[in-house]
Image (cartoon, coloured by chain):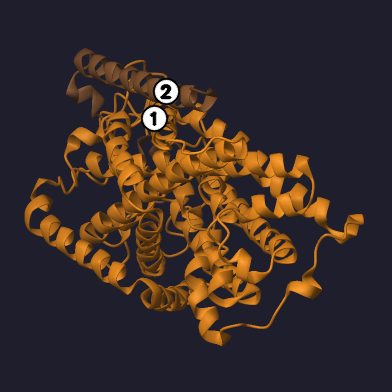
Chain colours: A brown, B orange
């Protein structure tokens, strides 16, 4: 095995670690907050405050 | 405006419709520039040169400027409309407000397909580049898959963790990749005494005549494909009306310069027969310059441009998917925002396996073709969109951050150029074009007869726009 073989294994391992981090946080977030809060975003609401459109 | 409370701890300083957790407004014009140029610049490092193979060096230059005109129209139109529709989703949200739900659904899918396919193509390229380095160091038979997967997973994780870090990363690596092109130009330019460029010896007439020029048009799009992605940052920039037009127009100017310099250097170093088939033409140009430092710099530039493009694609595809979920055009589950990182985390996660499937299982040219076709359909929508926008909300009825000049000339020019580009694509990839349009017709029928009943028709419009003229 040379350096590139080790790098292949390291890339697989790093990918798996990143995947686990993302999925773990996803499960934790979904179980800690209500669906209502998580999906409460509405388009352009801050925009409504900062931009002045003529009514 | 009395009901707004920007200091509220529970309502996120947002509007009256109950947003508890929204996307974070932290970006500036430089991030918008990085998002647009970052997605595109990889097209300067590879891909555009196929136009040289189709019609010779001059055909590639004509295609470069023809596509430059097309994308200048795209950038001007986008800048005006998006400076008023400052919400995630970009052209999808524009279509929803200006044209109608069926068009919005289609445009949303064009966006997601174009960016996810481009992300997959970039990941394939990362694997190819690392394999090239391995071969140069004497290692044959590298397994590219772990590097393809790592590129997608790392950038997905970065996007998951927050938009500021994501686009600051893009800003740095895009700036390095663009600087590398400038340095290559100056290092090989006769202005500074170098004599490596051999334009006089290498330039030929059009080898396949004007038909070759037409065939080259398809690949001229590679120089700029994706600049319209700047609009996806609309809900996360601090000052949308100023930052979006500024970042987008600065982006197209950067790309016009980068594209022309790339063509000039490459055709001065390689005969068109070779250049038309090169995998990484700018890297090859650096190698032919005879400078090891330039070779290393352009190698790094190629990798950085590829990563910046994939990074921007994840950002943009997830915003479009998120916006469609938020409006119930797709299951509302996708419309969730991470309460800590303030990113559309479920959309980011959902698109990861799709990108992996295409990156690991589909050939690069097919993936790129589907990305270009989706982009072309999107550009065809833009002139219709801006003409309707100006009719429904004439100048003075809505505050615009930017007004594009000579309306409707850019819209008409864009429509004509799209027609020519469609014909050019049809000549080379007619089957894929027909398959793609058939796909969109089928999903449109599904949306019209099955999905639209779930859309809350009033709830999808929360911006305080005046009533359109004539309604």
Question: How many residues crowd mark 2 within 10 Å: few (<14), some (14–19), many (20+)?
Answer: few
Residue B11, position as x, y percentages in the image: 32, 22
Q: Secondary structure at mark 2?
A: helix
Q: Nearer the viewer, residue A15 or B272?
A: B272
**Given the image, what chain letter belongs to the residue carrying mark 1?**
B
Q: Is residue B471 visible?
A: no
Percent coordinates x, y for residue B22 in the rendering: 34, 29
The relative height of residue B168 versus residue B416 in the rendered view (above or below) is above
User: How far across and down, in percent of the image, does residue B367 sit?
Assistant: 36, 54
Q: Residue at x 11, y 57 (%)?
A: B446
- Quarter of image, res B385: bottom left
- In the image, B244 versus B447, the foreground residue is B447
Quadrant housing the C terminus of chain B: bottom left
C-alpha distance separating marks 2 and 1? 15 Å
Comparing B226 with B212, the one in front is B212
2 and 1 marks on the same chain: no
- Is residue B453 in view? yes
**Residue, x 50% and y 80% (percent of image)?**
B214
Residue under pointer 1: B153
Q: Nearer the viewer, residue A22 or B80?
A: A22
Image coordinates for residue B258, horizontal then vertical, percent:
66, 56
Report the chain holding disc 2: A
Horizontal relation, residue B189 to residue A29: left or right: right
Is the residue marked by circle 1 packed among few (<14), some (14-19), or many (20+) residues within 10 Å? many
In the picture provided, is B214 more to the left or to the right than B357?
A: right
- Residue at the farthest right position: B193
Name the residue carrying label 2: A9
- Quadrant where the N terminus of chain B sits is top left
- Secondary structure category for the residue under label 1: helix
- The answer to which quarter of the image holds residue B51 is bottom right
């Amino acid at each position: 095995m040379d350096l590139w073989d080790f790098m292949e294994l390291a890339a697989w391992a790093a990918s798996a670690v990143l995947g686990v981090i993302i999925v773990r946080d996803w499960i934790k977030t979904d179980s800690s907050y209500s669906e209502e809060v998580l999906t409460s975003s509405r388009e352009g609401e801050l925009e409504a405050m900062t931009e002045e459109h003529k009514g | 405006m009395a009901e707004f409370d920007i200091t509220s701890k529970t309502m996120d300083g947002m509007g009256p419709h109950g947003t508890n957790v929204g996307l974070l407004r932290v970006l500036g014009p430089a991030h918008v520039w990085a998002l647009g140029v970052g997605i595109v610049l990889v097209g300067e490092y590879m891909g555009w040169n196929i136009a040289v193979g189709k019609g010779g060096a001059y055909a590639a230059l004509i295609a470069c400027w023809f596509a430059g005109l097309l994308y200048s129209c795209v950038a001007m139109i986008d800048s005006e409309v998006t400076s008023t529709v400052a919400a995630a989703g970009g052209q999808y949200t524009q279509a929803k407000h200006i044209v109608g739900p069926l068009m919005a659904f289609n445009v949303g899918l064009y966006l997601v397909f174009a960016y996810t396919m481009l992300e997959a193509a970039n990941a394939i390229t990362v694997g190819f580049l690392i394999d090239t380095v391995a071969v140069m160091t004497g290692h044959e038979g590298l397994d590219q898959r772990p590097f393809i997967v790592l590129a997608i997973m790392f950038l997905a994780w970065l996007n998951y963790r927050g938009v500021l870090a994501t686009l600051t990363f893009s800003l740095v690596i895009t700036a390095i990749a663009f600087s590398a092109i400038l340095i290559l130009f100056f290092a090989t330019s006769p202005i500074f005494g170098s004599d490596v460029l051999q334009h006089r010896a290498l330039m030929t007439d059009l080898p396949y005549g004007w038909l070759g020029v037409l065939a080259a048009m398809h690949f001229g799009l590679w120089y700029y494909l994706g600049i319209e992605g700047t609009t996806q940052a609309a809900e996360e920039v601090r000052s949308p009306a100023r930052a979006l037009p500024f970042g987008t127009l600065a982006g197209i100017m950067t790309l016009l310069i980068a594209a022309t310099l790339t063509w000039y250097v490459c055709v001065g170093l390689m005969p068109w027969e070779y250049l038309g088939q090169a995998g990484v033409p700018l890297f090859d140009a650096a190698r032919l310059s005879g400078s090891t430092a330039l070779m290393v710099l352009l190698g790094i530039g190629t990798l950085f441009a590829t990563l910046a493009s994939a990074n921007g694609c994840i950002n943009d595809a997830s915003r479009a998917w998120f916006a469609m979920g938020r409006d119930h055009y797709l299951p509302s589950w996708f419309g969730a925002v991470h309460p800590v990182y303030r990113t559309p985390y479920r959309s980011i996660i959902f698109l990861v396996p799709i990108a992996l499937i295409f990156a690991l299982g589909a050939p690069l040219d097919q993936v790129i073709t589907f990305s270009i076709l989706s982009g072309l359909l999107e550009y065809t929508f833009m002139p219709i969109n801006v003409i309707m926008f100006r009719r429904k909300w004439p100048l003075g009825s809505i505050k615009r951050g930017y007004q594009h000049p000579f309306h409707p000339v850019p819209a008409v020019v864009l429509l004509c150029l799209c027609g020519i580009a469609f014909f050019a694509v049809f000549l080379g990839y007619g089957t894929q074009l027909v398959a793609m349009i058939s796909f969109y017709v089928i999903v449109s029928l599904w949306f019209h007869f099955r999905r639209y009943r779930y859309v809350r028709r009033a709830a999808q419009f929360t911006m305080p726009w005046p009533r359109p003229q004539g309604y």
